Image: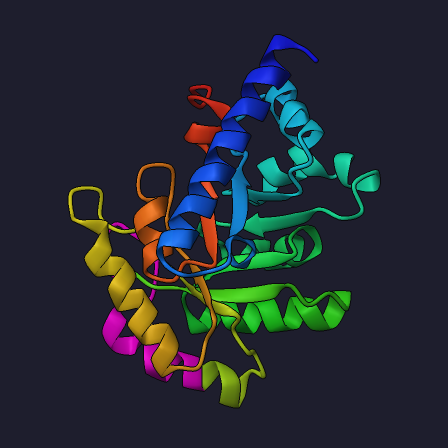
Amino acid sequence: MTHNTSKIAQARAEILARIAKSANVANRPAEAITLVAVSKQQTVARIDSMVATGQRVFGENRVQEAQTHWLERRKTLQDMQLHLIGPLQTNKAMEAVRCFDVIETLDRTKLAVALVSAMEKTGRNPDIFVQVNTGEEPQKAGILPAGVDDFIANLRKNYAIEPKGLMCIPPAQEEPAMHFALLQKMAKRNGLNGLSMGMSHDFETAIAFGATHVRIGTALFGARIPR
């Protein structure tokens, strides 16, 4: 085992232990929480080291980078699951449906139309999460909280999309708990079980509010390589 692999294996073990501890405090089973290892902007060596630990669920922000990282690796990793956790342009919907098992960032009707078309053409049906802009930040993707119920109803009625859950990225300068509580409330109201929320700095808080998926990059891999 190389030094890099050993370091990443230790980091993953520590994160899994913290997930288990947080789940126990919240009276939840640790296995109800999926660790999504965010591999965007990481090196080939780091990704290979993470795969070597047995990690099989990964998150990427961009379709093209995900293809670079995973198209070849997936040929030998039949049990892996790849999540799109970054904004998706409608013209990339076909590639995204082919590449990803879970798309966490559906946030507009036009994209829903593109995804449905891509799923029909490819025969692939990735799980879909709706991204909510809980902080109502103008620069951030996501449905505004006031529009979530109608958006989900529209997906179900007109597009035959049954979302698996909701996803959010709280504002950096605000207490995340209030955003996680809001997302949990909206999910419950709409009969959704999945909650993708919580990153390296706040995933334990997210677990307390029912997170089913935590998206962790830096705490697992170390600092990202600058572009």
Asked if the magenta segment contains residue 66, the reply would be no
Of 1 and 58, which appears nearest the observer?
A: 1
Residue 220 in the image: state x and y as whole percent.
49, 29
At 73% from the left edge and 65% from the top edge, which residue is drawn?
A: 124
Toward the left, the furthest residue is: 174
Image side of residue 45 versus residue 134, left or right: right
Residue 155 in the image: state x and y as whole percent.
49, 81
**Residue 39 drawn above or below residue 58:** above
Of 189 and 120, which appears nearest the observer?
A: 189
Name the quarter where the C terminus is drawn: top left
Image side of residue 69 versus residue 146, left or right: right
Name the quarter where the N terminus is drawn: top right
At 65% from the left edge and 23% from the top edge, which residue is drawn?
A: 49
- The part of the image, by quadrant, that contains residue 196 is bottom left
At 32% from the left edge and 74% from the top edge, which residue is drawn?
A: 186
Residue 219 in the image: state x and y as whole percent.
42, 29
Q: Is residue 41 visible?
A: no
The stretch of residues the image draws in magenta is 134-153
